[in-house]
Image: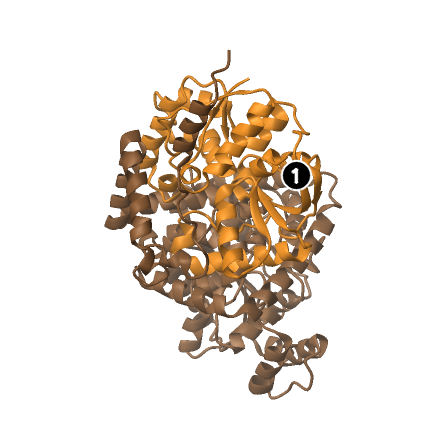
Amino acid sequence: MSVNTVQFQTDADRMQQDGDRREFLRTALNGYILTRSGQQSKYGDYEAARTTAAAIKWQAIENLGEHLERFADNLEARGVHVHWCSDAAEARAAIVGVLKKHDAKAIVKSKCMTTEEIHLNELLEKQGYDVVESDLGEYIVQLRREAPYHFVFPAMHLKRGEIRELFERELGDAPTDDPEALTMIARQALRQKYLAADVGISGANFGVAETGMISITENEGNARLTTAMPKVHIALMGIEKVIPRFADLAVMLPMLALAGTGQRLTGYNSQFAGPRQEGECDGPEEMHVVLLDNHRTELLAHPEERDALRCIRCGACLNVCPVFKNVGGHTYGTTYQGPIGSVITPHLRGMKDWKHLSNASSLCGACTETCPVRIDLHHHLLRNRHSAAESSGGWAERMQMRGFALVMRQPWLYGIASSLGRWAHTLSRPIHGTRLDPVYAWRKTRDFPAPAPKTFQQLWRERKKDQPPRH
Amino acid sequence: MNVSLFIPCFVDQLFPHVGLAMADVLERLGCTVDYPESQTCCGQPAFNCGYQEEAAKVADHFLRCFSQSEQVVVPSGSCAAMVKHFYKDLFRDTPREAEATRIGERTHEFSQFLVHQMGASDVGAKLPGRATFHDGCHGLRELGVKSEPRLLLEQVDGLELVEMTEAETCCGFGGTFSVKFPQVSTSMVEVKTESIEATGAEYVVSNDPSCLMQIQGYLTRQKKKPKCMHLAEVLASR
């Protein structure tokens, strides 16, 4: 077992013991599901909207190179510096290069999972920069020095009291656990940061090729402040975020809001098309867009897997996933949790170390049913299992499966195995429920049924003997 | 109608009464039922673990067993989905593809067969009590089984059908998932059983015996009252 598998199992064990936390997660997510279905019903034809959203993203991915070039050309025409980065190290270097050029010290960030993917905060902090997350949830997990729990709701695992204690400890102020009061405390701390920041770093939910714009969706207005107040704005985006036309936003923005948070539209949707132009009164003096590949083109090269690049990171698959609800976000140990994380992480970070995520699913398909861009998530997990078995399947499992296939295609062997199984079950009765029990994992919490006294096949023969033949 | 029974391996070994109940109902509705004796398993355990080559060998055996059958009926949404959907993938671009497609089209999950092929809703069953229905994921999402079992259950004399809030939530079985990640599987079935208990139902009914094995296993261990019954057993009751 890889280190990551062991970690997953340990963390999952801990979550199983923590019934309160699971209950808390479930209540929160069930609330989201209710809100979301309420809004969904306002669509004239929601399924058609999903199909359209999927088609837009599909078109974008199928012609990714062309759209990206157009996107970059349009940005550059308006004075944006575009950086093409093939991996995390190049993206980090490009960002640090800009910071150095401007002799920046203070950085304010708005929520961006791609920066989590390249571990930007750790690097910048190590190099002595003052970096602060301006999204409330991200700010909370940053203060706790932990990774986001969910890529849309980063601090969803924390109860109000825990946030109050955190603020008391870290900010020295938190008289109540009223959410509004807590938000005001964070806001006060953050406002100073915007004013002092040399550089603002954001992500991008979409990049519009036709016009050369990045589009950011948010609810707090923090991304607007992050991108508008500092003199320099750097946006980091994965190359799969590009969409062909401006008009596509009319479908994608409400879809992202609905699938992500259950809103009709998020509070703020902004498009950024370059630094301050002549005659304009505000905006950054310089703008950079960092385009990150980081193994995305490898996924693109794979005809059966590439539709995973359609993902708009709405988090809907996490919200409905019974595994996510019961293990929580940190157990995954990945930037992107839940079903989509389990699908793409083995491709982005290596099958050998991350294949366990594909197995940590009951393949129930709730994720596929909910995905707004129709990614066939649970069948991806199934294919990942196949790739894992091909490339790094364990010897023991392979032998078991070969044995299984051998027995199941020879009825006489199946008959022998069935009788042996019955004997073994009777003989092994003393060890049932102990560590020696081959089905210990099952019997620890559940009763495993004993084999029936007679198989169906035996009972059927007896039944036929008793029944006179029909004419 | 001539019908061949496909009795999945674990039903053969652990729940043979489910297979007999299914045969009873089909015969009661006038079907001529046969059971190709060389059958074993659909191959899903290997397929779901990623071992497609091994799964294809078992699937090939299945196709040979049922090559003469007019209709194949399965008391498990999961195994039916394997034959109907995944065999085509397994044999894509091979000489077996046409046969896999042909047999897939003739294979039916039990409740869908009754409602769509037999046009049945009232099968003359009687079972007094309150029941709740659990939607097995593969039946629900791969085959679209949703209304059929409910339609059949509503016609059962004396049976009151009450919906649970988590009817469509996975019970946590998932084949080898329940052994590879027993803690997650247990948390999931805990949610399921809480939802079942909240309905006050005496019976938990499903069209998938593997889900029922998971749910009953947990209910028994927790010394909880509700009793699991396969849809076929309910419909066979008189």
Q: At 37% from the left edge and 45% from the top edge, which residue is drawn?
A: B49
Q: Residue furthest bottom?
A: A172
- In the displayed structure, would residue A388 be above or below residue A445? above
SS assignment at label 1: helix
Q: How many marks?
A: 1
Which color scheme does this rendered protein use? by chain
In what quadrant of the picture does the N terminus of chain B appear? top right
A141 sits to left or right of A52: left
Q: Which residue is mark 1?
A: A47
**Chain ID, brown in image:** A
What color was chain B assigned in the picture? orange
Q: Residue furthest top?
A: A471
Pick the front one: B24 or B51:
B24
Q: At 53% from the left edge and 33% from the top edge, which residue is drawn?
A: B21
- Image quarter for residue B99? top left
Mark 1 neighbour class, 10 Å CA radius: few under 14, some 14 to 19, many 20 or more = few
Pick the front one: A345 or A415:
A415
In what quadrant of the picture does the C terminus of chain B appear? top right
- Residue A18: x and y in percent read 52, 70
A375 sits to left or right of A43: left
Report in which chain the residue with disc 1 lies: A
Pick the front one: A52 or A85:
A52
Is any atom of residue B111 visible in this view?
yes
**What is the three-letter code of the residue carrying label 1?**
Glu
- Residue A334: x and y in percent read 44, 61
- In the displayed structure, would residue A208 be above or below residue A445? above
- Residue A93: x and y in percent read 39, 65
Q: At 44% from the left edge and 39% from the top edge, which residue is drawn?
A: B11
